[in-house]
């Protein structure tokens, strides 16, 4: 199962704290439709998970993972680098 670092949880909470984002929202990780590279992923803000999404809740940070993406990320870790108002998410190997 995908794990979420404290940096990633902090970044997600910050993103979802924006006034225009409803309570219960999170980020959604899904495969990119029509991507040139197999397994390419995209991260978006989602108000609710899709019916088949896997829902992770780590320290108040909600992550919705599309079923196909969940298979790719099963043994991975979601981390983030926060630089002022910019957030960069990346996937790494679990320790």
Image (cartoon, rainbow, N blue to C red):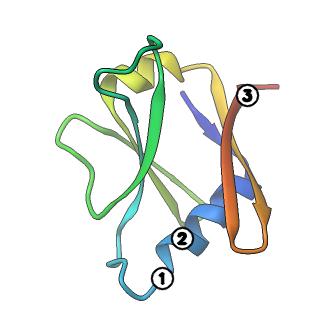
**Residue lying at 49% horizontally and 17% vertically, measured from the top left:** 72
Residue extending furthest bottom?
19
**Residue lying at 36% horizontally and 66% vertically, measured from the top left:** 25
Residue extending furthest front?
36
The answer to which of marks 1 and 3 sits earlier in the sequence is 1
The answer to which of marks 2 and 3 sits earlier in the sequence is 2
Image coordinates for residue 84, horizontal then vertical, percent:
78, 74
For the residue carrying disc 1, how many other residues have a C-alpha within 10 Å: few (<14), some (14-19), or many (20+)? few
Compared to residue 55, the image places residue 36 above or below, namely: above
In the structure shown, which secondary structural element does the residue marked by tag 3 occupy? strand
- Mark identifier at residue 87: none
Image coordinates for residue 32, horizontal then vertical, percent:
36, 29
Alpha carbon separation for disc pair 1 and 2? 6 Å
For the residue carrying disc 2, how many other residues have a C-alpha within 10 Å: few (<14), some (14-19), or many (20+)? some
Is 46 situated left or right of 89 in this image? left
**Residue lying at 26% horizontally and 59% vertically, measured from the top left:** 48
Asked if marks 1 and 2 touch (Cβ < 8 Å), the reply is yes
Image coordinates for residue 23, horizontal then vertical, percent:
35, 78
Compared to residue 53, the image places residue 27 above or below, namely: below
Q: Which residue is mark 2?
A: 15
In the structure shown, which secondary structural element does the residue marked by tag 1 occupy? loop
Image coordinates for residue 28, horizontal then vertical, percent:
40, 47
**Residue lying at 17% horizontally and 41% vertically, measured from the top left:** 51
Is 89 situated left or right of 44 in this image? right
Q: Which residue is mark 3?
A: 92
Q: Which residue is mark 1?
A: 18
Compared to residue 15, the image places residue 91 above or below, namely: above
């Amino acid at each position: 199962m995908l794990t979420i670092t404290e940096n990633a949880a902090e970044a997600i909470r910050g993103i979802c704290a924006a006034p225009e984002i409803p309570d219960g929202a999170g980020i959604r990780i899904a495969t990119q439709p029509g991507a040139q590279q197999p397994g390419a992923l995209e991260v978006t803000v989602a108000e609710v998970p899709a019916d088949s999404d896997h829902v992770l809740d780590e320290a108040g940070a909600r992550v919705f993972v599309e079923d196909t993406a969940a298979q790719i990320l099963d043994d991975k870790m979601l981390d983030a680098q926060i630089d002022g108002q910019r957030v960069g998410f990346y996937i790494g190997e679990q320790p």
